[in-house]
Amino acid sequence: MVLADLGKKITGAFKNLNSATVVDEQVPEDQLVLS
């Protein structure tokens, strides 16, 4: 289902943000591309 996949991608993006020790410009830009 499309919404379930989107939810998984968003959850994964937040996990990546939490695991990043230094959040610079590249990290948020990487999360904006949810492909």
Image (tube, rainbow, N blue to C red):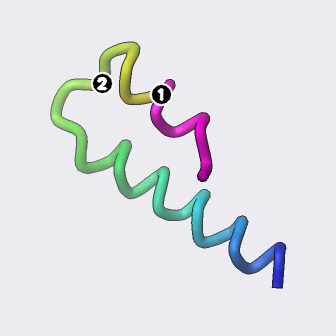
Which portion, as a residue range, is magenta? 29-35
Could you say whether the residue bearing mark 2 is in a helix, strand or loop? loop
Asked whether 10 falls inside the magenta stretch, the response is no
Determine whether 21 is above or below 7 in the image: above
Location of residue 16 in the rendering, given as x and y in whole percent from the top left corner: 35, 50
Q: Residue at x 69, y 74 (%)?
A: 5
Could you say whether the residue bearing mark 1 is in a helix, strand or loop? helix
Location of residue 35 in the rendering, given as x and y in whole percent from the top left corner: 60, 52
Left or right of 26? Residue 5 is: right
Numbered-mark total: 2
N-term mark: 1 or 2: 2
Q: Residue furthest left?
A: 21
Residue where numbered disc 2 is placed? 23
Q: Residue furthest right?
A: 2
Residue in front for this viewpoint, 7 or 2: 2
Asked whether 33 falls inside the magenta stretch, the response is yes
Residue where numbered disc 1 is placed? 28
Cα separation between marks 1 and 2: 8 Å
Q: Amino acid at mark 1?
A: Pro
Mark 2 crowdedness (10 Å alpha carbons): few <14, some 14-19, many ≥20: few
Q: Are marks 1 and 2 in contact (CB under 8 Å)?
A: yes
